[in-house]
Image (cartoon, rainbow, N blue to C red):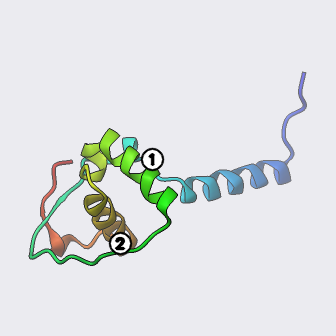
Amino acid sequence: MNAPLTFEELQLLKRMIREYKAQRLDFSELPRRPRFKGPRVNSGITCNAEIRRQALERVKADPVGTGGSLSGLIEFLLWKYLGCPEHVVGISLG
């Protein structure tokens, strides 16, 4: 039988879990992606080819959470990065 964790081990485990959660993006736990209002602009973002390929696979598999396209995913990620400003949201489907 394993011994219970010490206080220090428990604190370390909690920190590891917080850091892990801060780095992962699990769209299945998020409400549906909001619909943004206002005009759209084409930004022409450049990224690594393999990251783009894998991202395309994921967005097609999760259109509700990502918008179904790289543009929708990037828009959503930028919105989250900016702290989810409400003034740019037209309709929230969550």
- The quarter of the displayed image where residue 86 is located: bottom left
Q: Residue 83 got which mark?
A: 2
* Amino acid beneath label 2: Gly
Identified at 16% across, 49% down, the residue is 93
Q: Which residue is mark 1?
A: 26
Frontmost residue, 46 versus 32: 46
Residue 90, image x, y percentages: 10, 64
Identified at 56% across, 53% down, the residue is 21
Neighbours of disc 1 within 10 Å: few (<14), some (14-19), many (20+): few
Tell me whether the residue at label 1 lies in contact with that at label 2, contact meaning CB atoms closer than 8 angstroms: no
Identified at 84% across, 40% down, the residue is 5
Neighbours of disc 2 within 10 Å: few (<14), some (14-19), many (20+): few
Q: Is residue 4 above or below residue 10?
A: above
Q: Is residue 23 rendered to the left or right of residue 83?
A: right
Identified at 33% across, 48% down, the residue is 59
Count all numbered tags in the image, as a single digit. Answer: 2
Residue 31, image x, y percentages: 28, 47
Q: Looking at the image, is mark 1 or mark 2 nearer the viewer?
A: 1
Going from the N terminus, do you reach mark 1 or mark 2 first? 1
- The quarter of the displayed image where residue 29 is located: top left
Q: CA distance from mark 1 to mark 2?
A: 17 Å
Q: Secondary structure at mark 1?
A: loop
